[in-house]
Amino acid sequence: MARIYTKTGDRGYTGLFGGDRVLKSNPRIEAYGTIDELNSWLGLINSFRDKSIPAELFRDVQNNLFTIGSLLASTSKKQENVPSLETSSINSLESAIDKMEENLPALTSFILPGGNVMAGYCHLARTVCRRAERRIVALEGVEGLEMIIQYINRLSDFLFVLARKVVHDAGDTEIQWKPKV
């Protein structure tokens, strides 16, 4: 039986697809580690999600995040063995955003994260998504980088609108930002 622990990372290094060994603080590791964190938040949200959001959509998003993580972890030597992100994945998020927005009130001011627990989870996922985006835009030499950035940007929009939908559907109130001037 294979063990989960290999001890190959005990000195602070890990392997990329392609064989290169890099420090665990490497920007690529930080980027795909943040994608992994985001995927975990989405798994939590999915377990509590309202049935009006199809489970298949969340499954697709989580699968796409695994694809993105594998692309970020791949060197040019191994990228041919990694799945690619499709434009249809971005289109799917845009369609879901449009559908959710149909029943939401117009956004007239900034809103504070929260409104209810589920919306709070969505906002946490959105901020992790934005951090992933910041980590990803700093990378070079990643196959499909432009599409990855577009997908992650759209995913953060999706999570923002999902948070609004969750608050609206529960009959709760969005908390508007009221700056003191």
Image: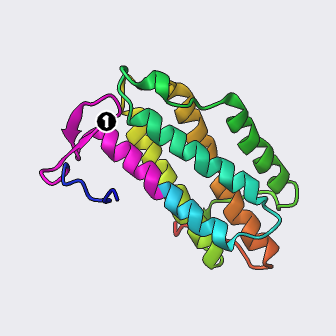
**Does residue 142 appear left or right of residue 92 in this picture?**
left
Magenta extent: 9-37
**Does residue 68 appear left or right of residue 16 in this picture?**
right
SS for callout 1: loop
Residue 179 part of the magenta segment: no
Q: For residue 4, say whether it is visible.
A: yes
Query: Which residue of the protein is positioned furthest toward the left in this rendering?
Result: 11
Residue occupying image coordinates x 36% and y 25%: 140
Is 102 situated above or below 52? above
Query: Mark 1 Cα within 10 Å, few/some/many (few <14, many 20+)?
Result: some
Please give the residue where the numbered disc 1 appears in the rendered image: 16
Tell me the amino acid under the disc marked 1: Leu
Quarter of the view holding residue 120: bottom right
The x and y percentages for residue 98 are 81, 47
Tag count in the figure?
Answer: 1
Residue 27 part of the magenta segment: yes
Residue occupying image coordinates x 69% and y 37%: 89
- Between 41 and 79, the one nearer to me in the picture: 79
Is 112 situated above or below 38? below
The x and y percentages for residue 130 are 49, 49
- Between 27 and 161, the one nearer to me in the picture: 27
Query: Which residue of the protein is positioned furthest toward the front in this rendering?
Result: 1
Residue occupying image coordinates x 44% and y 24%: 79
| Colour mapping used in the image | rainbow
Query: Which corner quadrant holds the N terminus?
Result: bottom left
Q: For residue 177, say whether it is visible.
A: no
The x and y percentages for residue 158 are 67, 51
Is 51 situated above or below 54? below
- Between 117 and 89, the one nearer to me in the picture: 89
Residue occupying image coordinates x 48% and y 26%: 81
